[in-house]
Amino acid sequence: MTYRDAVYDVTSYLSDHPGGDRLLIAAGGSDATEAFDDVGHSEDAEETMEGMKVGSLSGWVTLLPSALLWLFRKTERKAVETRSETALDRNKYRPLTLIEKDKVGKNAWRLRMAFPDQRSRSGLAVGQHISLRASIAGKTVIRSYTPTSRPTHAGSLDLTIKVYEDGVMGNHLQDRSLGEPIHVRGPHGRFHYRRNASKKLVCIAGGSGITPMFNVIQEICLDERDHTEVILLYASRSEDDTMMKRELERLKMVRPSKLEVEYLVSRPAYGSGLEPARFSGDYLAERLGALDDDTKYLVCGPDAMVDMVSEGLTGLNAEADVHIF
């Protein structure tokens, strides 16, 4: 395919393309400039493309039709051998099979759902979410969740959910048996994490709001080319309510220089020695006031917590660099 004034052989990237190989195959043998720019690819995508450049249009004019046809046929052959379709569809719900269900904490579960093709990927960018739909007590219920498996993981998708007493969808998912279908649509969300977008990234989470943060933090810690330093401030009602602590501690061990985590508990157990803590303006000013300007903020949690954090960050003149999930 061509992009602007260059020719690219994308065959080797078919199985890794976040949007699946069909999009690349469809663009084979043609000018992909408009399609590429319309999607709004990141600098990382353009950097990846540079490694697949095989020449420029200058000097190719007379050979262009035959050269593009050769590249297109090569791409098609490779696709047949290593097809990696996107498992999800942003426009319609698809049934995924529940293959694992593990209790991972107080009222917390990890659900693993299999794709029909084990070579498929979700098609999500880091930071995006999905919608789940179910018929519960005669009503259609739809809820959004951020997967905790990496977007590049093939064959299945993981969700880590918190089940609340009045949570309709959470209780429904908790009661599902292995082998049952779960209807999923996506990806959704305009937020796409970009590698090295800032020197520091502050993630402020409350309760189950940890899942989109974990999705981003995991990618940063496991990407050797990403030098972003992450500070996670994570508040829970009690120590037992802290989700994904084991996974976060593992990431700290893998990349101790990248990740700093501070756990806050609003209702510590009697005798624990912990003081009740929350994201007050004074706390945020003391904890974050000394950070430099090259810092971005992610916030996710209950509405009251988000309002409190937003007010505190406004006091630090950081509101322009905040994304709220």
Image (tube, grey):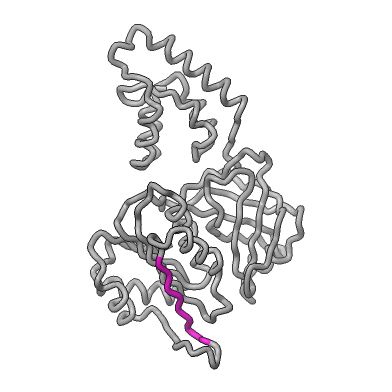
Compared across the picture, whether 177 is left or right of 86 comes to right
Q: Is residue 216 above or below residue 207?
A: above
Q: Give the x, y percent position of residue 13.
A: 49, 32
Q: Is residue 91 visible?
A: no
Which of these two is toward me, 125 or 248? Answer: 248
Q: Is residue 118 visible?
A: yes
Residue sitting at x 64%, y 66%:
109
Task: Give the vertical position of 1 relative to 191 (above or below).
Answer: above
Residue at screen point 63% across, 56% down: 133
Expressed as whole percent of the image width and height from the top left, the position of residue 101 reads: 70, 61
Q: Quadrant of the N terminus?
A: top left
Query: With 18 as the anchor, is 158 left or right in this view?
Result: right
Q: How many marks?
A: 0
Q: Main secondary structure of the magenta part?
A: strand
In this view, the residue in front, 225 or 158, is: 225
Residue farthest along the bottom direction in this orientation = 271
In the image, taking residue 307 as reference, residue 273 lies left or right, namely right
Query: 77 left or right of 196?
Result: right
Q: Nearer the viewer, residue 252 or 99?
A: 252
Of the 4 image quadrants, the one containing the C terminus is bottom left
Q: Quadrant of residue 78?
A: top right
Residue drawn at point x = 49 percent, y = 67 percent: 209
Residue 264 lies in the magenta stretch = yes
Residue 62 drawn at (x, y percent) = 34, 6
69 w.r.t. 316: above or below:
above
Residue range in magenta is 260-268
Q: Quadrant of residue 106?
A: bottom right
Residue 192 among those drawn in magenta: no
